[in-house]
């Protein structure tokens, strides 16, 4: 099935998502800049909090590298607002709650297993998109520790 999903060199699917303020954002809004889209399972959980804080701490360095950030989960706009306020997050967040959304288009909303049970969930993944809107690098099944710094180094080199 994975072969059907966009891969390196393909255009990033241009699917609109809700911003915490109730607006809309989509990958093409960032054309002309590099873009890191990081998908994470849930606001205010340990790994997701660390990942968001790591990207936030490096946000000025990403900006200096001509790279925008966008964190994506299925959490509501209201949950995102609380998450941002609680942890003083700098990386913008978006809600990809709609069926057929960006996470579906990329295959990162997928079946997961925990404690012998199967469920649908967000696979922690990161996409680096070049200034032309093409996928330049994919990190599937991300381990949080050191990830934001690795993505920054890759973005600088692009």
Image: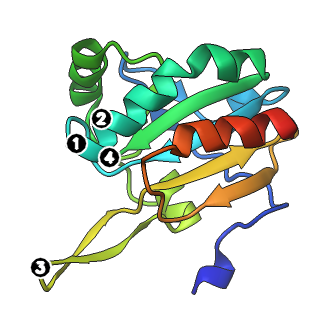
Residue, disc 2: 49
- Residue 74, x across and y down, in percent: 32, 46
- Residue 126, x across and y down, in percent: 57, 51
Residue, disc 4: 74
For the N terminus, the image quarter is bottom right
- SS class, disc 1: helix
Work out whether mark 1 precedes mark 4 in sequence or the reverse, and give the earlier one: 1
Q: Is residue 109 left or right of residue 119?
A: right
Q: In the depicted view, which residue is nearer to us: 60 or 112?
A: 60
In the image, residue 26 above or below residue 24: below
Dot in front, 1 or 4 = 1
Q: CA distance from mark 2 to mark 3?
A: 23 Å
- Residue 138, x across and y down, in percent: 66, 58
Q: Are marks 1 and 2 in contact (CB under 8 Å)?
A: yes
Task: State which quadrant residue 154 falls in.
Answer: top right
Tell me which residue sits at (64%, 50%) in the image: 127
Tell me which residue sits at (81%, 61%) in the image: 10
Residue, disc 1: 46
For the C terminus, the image quarter is top right
């Amino acid at each position: 099935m994975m072969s059907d999903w966009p891969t390196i060199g393909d255009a990033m699917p241009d699917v609109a998502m809700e911003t915490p303020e109730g607006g809309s954002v989509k990958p093409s809004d960032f054309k002309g800049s590099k873009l890191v889209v990081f998908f994470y399972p849930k606001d205010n959980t340990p790994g997701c909090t660390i990942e968001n804080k790591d990207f936030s701490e490096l946000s000025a360095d990403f900006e200096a590298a001509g790279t925008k950030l966008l964190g994506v989960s299925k959490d509501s706009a209201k949950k995102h607002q609380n998450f941002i306020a609680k942890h003083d997050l700098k990386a913008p967040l978006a809600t990809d709650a709609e069926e057929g959304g960006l996470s579906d288009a990329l295959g990162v909303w997928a079946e997961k297993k925990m404690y012998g049970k199967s469920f649908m969930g967000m696979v922690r993944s990161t996409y680096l998109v070049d200034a032309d809107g093409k996928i330049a690098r994919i990190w599937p099944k991300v381990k949080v520790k050191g990830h934001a710094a690795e993505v920054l180094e890759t973005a600088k080199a692009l």
